[in-house]
């Protein structure tokens, strides 16, 4: 199957296109975070997102979808200012149509659509897609090191190398975990007060970050189809002091517990230690996380977290014309305060 690029039609994505888009993504990118391409997950990500429906275009040839480009809407905070963003996520070109400029055409046209109400694009490309983004004006912000805390060191050492590249297994049951599921997290007593205090402390921080709200946490960690997130909470004197959120997954022969969020009142190191201890004891072979380079990682290091050699999430960005001139330089690593939960699923 092949056809010249000039016979292609580019048009906006429609919900009726979901089955064809899923088939294309499966062909090009395998099964995704859950191990299979699922309509419910696609809708959660691109249609039910609290930041708004994704910017999405498809390339069509003879009535068949052969290309897909999606920019998932996101909102970041810089101090108290909202920075409207999109993140370059699902993109695919059918193998028979590769080399015809479809990726570039879809991306260029999607950027034009996004620029109407968006200030910047960011994403975490892999080694295969990164060169294409860099050639279109993206900049590498940072290679965020993955921090690992082995819980069973001998088992971790035995399987770590071949488990690093293991893909999710379709329809595989998620491994057991000693932490509670997030089903009741939105109703947790004191959650709103905790989030309000944490956000208030960050208002003087000009690093780009995702705003933590009950609605966001519910969408991100409770409503996500096909995945089960877990949490630990610390109460003292009837006050919710902190919450940690993550998910257990099989990575090859290892059970990895991702530490996606650490939500703790400022300077409360005792709560931070208790939450980390809860994750270390939750039943995984190791715990994995990332933190901003400018963050104080002393507590994590004292609990045995160390950078995993050669493992990092590459954060890239592309400013759009609507980005205010008086914001910090979004191309600089010190301008970002992203967490694993911001990046690990998208």
Image (tube, rainbow, N blue to C red):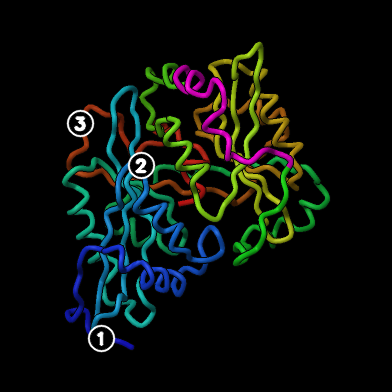
Q: Quick check: is 75 in the magenta stretch?
A: no
> Dot 1: few (<14), some (14–19), or many (≥20) neighbours within 10 Å?
few
What's the magenta region? Answer: 178-197
Q: Quadrant of the N terminus?
A: bottom left
Work out which residue is located at the far right of the displayed protein and give it: 154
Is there a contact, CB below 8 Å, between mark 2 and mark 3?
Answer: no
**N-term-proximal mark, 2 vs 3:** 2
Q: Position of residue 288 (x, y in %)?
A: 64, 43
Q: CA distance from mark 2 to mark 3?
A: 27 Å
User: In this rendering, is residue 231 above or below 32?
Assistant: above
Q: Position of residue 282 (x, y in %)?
A: 74, 39
User: In this rendering, is residue 267 above or below 183?
Assistant: above
Element under disc 3: loop
Q: Position of residue 188 (x, y in %)?
A: 57, 27
**N-term-proximal mark, 1 vs 3:** 1
Q: Which residue is mark 3?
A: 325
Element under disc 2: loop
The answer to whether one can see residue 130 in this image is no
The answer to whether one can see residue 121 in this image is yes
Element under disc 1: loop
Q: Which residue is mark 2?
A: 50
Q: Which residue is mark 1?
A: 3
Work out which residue is located at the far bottom of the displayed protein and give it: 1
Q: Which residue is located at x 23 percent, y 43 percent?
A: 118
Task: Left or right? Give the position of 240 relative to 124.
Answer: right
**N-term-proximal mark, 2 vs 1:** 1
Quarter of the image for residue 82 reads: top left
Q: Nearer the viewer, residue 208 or 257?
A: 257
């Amino acid at each position: 199957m092949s056809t010249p690029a000039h016979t292609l039609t580019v048009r906006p994505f429609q919900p009726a296109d979901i089955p064809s888009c899923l088939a294309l993504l499966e062909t090009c990118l395998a099964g995704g975070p859950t191990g299979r391409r699922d309509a419910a997950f696609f809708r959660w990500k691109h249609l039910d997102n609290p930041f708004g429906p994704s910017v999405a275009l498809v390339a069509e040839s003879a009535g068949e979808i052969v290309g897909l480009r999606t920019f998932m809407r996101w909102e970041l905070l810089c101090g108290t200012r909202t920075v409207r963003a999109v993140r370059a996520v699902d993109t695919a070109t059918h193998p028979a149509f590769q080399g015809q400029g479809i990726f570039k055409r879809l991306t260029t046209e999607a950027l034009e659509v996004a620029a109407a109400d968006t200030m910047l694009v960011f994403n975490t490309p892999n080694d295969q897609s990164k060169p294409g983004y860099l050639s279109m004006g993206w900049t590498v912000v940072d290679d965020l090191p993955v921090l690992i805390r082995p819980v069973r060191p001998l088992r971790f050492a035995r399987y770590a190398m071949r488990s690093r590249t293991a893909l999710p297994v379709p329809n595989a049951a998620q491994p057991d975990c000693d932490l509670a599921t997030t089903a009741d997290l939105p109703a947790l007593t004191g959650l709103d007060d905790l989030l309000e205090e944490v956000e208030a402390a960050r208002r003087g921080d000009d690093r780009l970050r995702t705003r933590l709200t009950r609605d966001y946490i519910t969408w991100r960690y409770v409503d996500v189809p096909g995945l089960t997130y877990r949490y630990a909470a610390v109460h003292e004197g009837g006050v919710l002091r902190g919450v940690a959120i993550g998910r257990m997954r099989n990575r090859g022969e290892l059970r990895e517990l991702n530490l996606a969020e650490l939500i703790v009142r400022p300077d409360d190191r005792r709560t931070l230690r208790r939450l980390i201890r809860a994750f270390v004891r939750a039943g995984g072979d190791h715990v994995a996380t990332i933190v901003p380079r400018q963050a104080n990682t002393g507590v994590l290091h004292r609990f045995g977290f160390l950078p995993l050699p050669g493992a990092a999430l590459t954060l890239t960005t592309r400013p759009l014309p609507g980005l205010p001139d008086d914001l910090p330089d979004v191309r600089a690593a010190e301008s970002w305060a992203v967490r694993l939960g911001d990046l690990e699923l998208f």
